[in-house]
Image: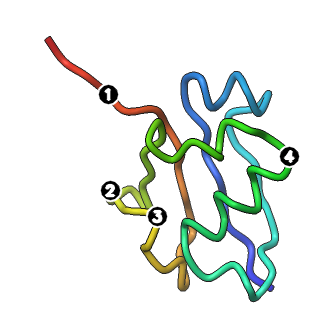
């Protein structure tokens, strides 16, 4: 197991009920997608990946990005400008 800090922003934060948490990840959670799938078991907001963006150690990532030795994973909605 490894421990990561997970950050939640905007509507994701509202759904989860907190802005961040430390979580121990099982060895079978290898990618951001694996983590999102695991989190979707508790919070449906993670099931709609079209409406989520993610960063790993403050670098934009995809759901295929390996977690590896990451220290921080952030989930947030897409940002639009105008």
Label 4 or label 1, whichever comes before in sequence order: 4
* The image quarter in which residue 9 lies: top right
Residue 49: x %, y % from top left: 51, 47
- Residues at circles 1 and 2 in contact by the CB criterion of under 8 Å: no
Identify the residue at the far right of this view.
42
The structure residue drawn at horizontal position 32% and vertical position 27%, both measured from the top left corner, is 79
Label 1 or label 3, whichever comes before in sequence order: 3
Q: Can you say whether 79 is above or below 46 in the image?
A: above
Residue 35: x %, y % from top left: 66, 65
Q: Which residue is mark 2?
A: 60
| Tag 2 secondary structure | strand
Q: Which residue is mark 4?
A: 42
| Tag 3 secondary structure | loop
Give the foreground label among 2 and 3. 3
- Residues at circles 1 and 3 in contact by the CB criterion of under 8 Å: no
Q: Which residue is mark 1?
A: 79
Give the foreground label among 2 and 4. 4
How many numbered dots are placed on residues in this image? 4
The structure residue drawn at horizontal position 32% and vertical position 56%, both measured from the top left corner, is 60
Q: Can you say whether 33 is above or below 45 in the image?
A: below
The structure residue drawn at horizontal position 37% and vertical position 33%, both measured from the top left corner, is 78
Q: Seen in the image, is 41 located left or right of residue 33?
A: right
Identify the residue at the far top of this view.
82
Label 2 or label 4, whichever comes before in sequence order: 4
* The image quarter in which residue 7 lies: top right
| Tag 4 secondary structure | loop
Cα distance in 3D space between marks 1 and 2: 12 Å
Decide: few, some or many residues near mark 4? Use Cα within 10 Å; few <14, some 14-19, many ≥20: few
The structure residue drawn at horizontal position 42% and vertical position 45%, both measured from the top left corner, is 53
Residue 16: x %, y % from top left: 76, 33
Q: State the residue in front, 57 or 27.
A: 27
Q: Which residue is mark 3?
A: 63
């Amino acid at each position: 197991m490894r421990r990561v800090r997970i950050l939640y922003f905007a509507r994701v934060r509202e759904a989860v009920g907190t802005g961040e948490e430390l979580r121990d990840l099982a060895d079978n959670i290898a990618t951001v997608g694996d983590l999102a799938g695991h989190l979707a078991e508790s919070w449906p907001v993670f099931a709609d990946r079209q409406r989520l963006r993610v960063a790993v150690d403050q670098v934009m990532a995809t759901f295929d990005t390996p977690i590896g030795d990451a220290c921080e994973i952030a989930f947030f909605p897409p940002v639009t400008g105008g």
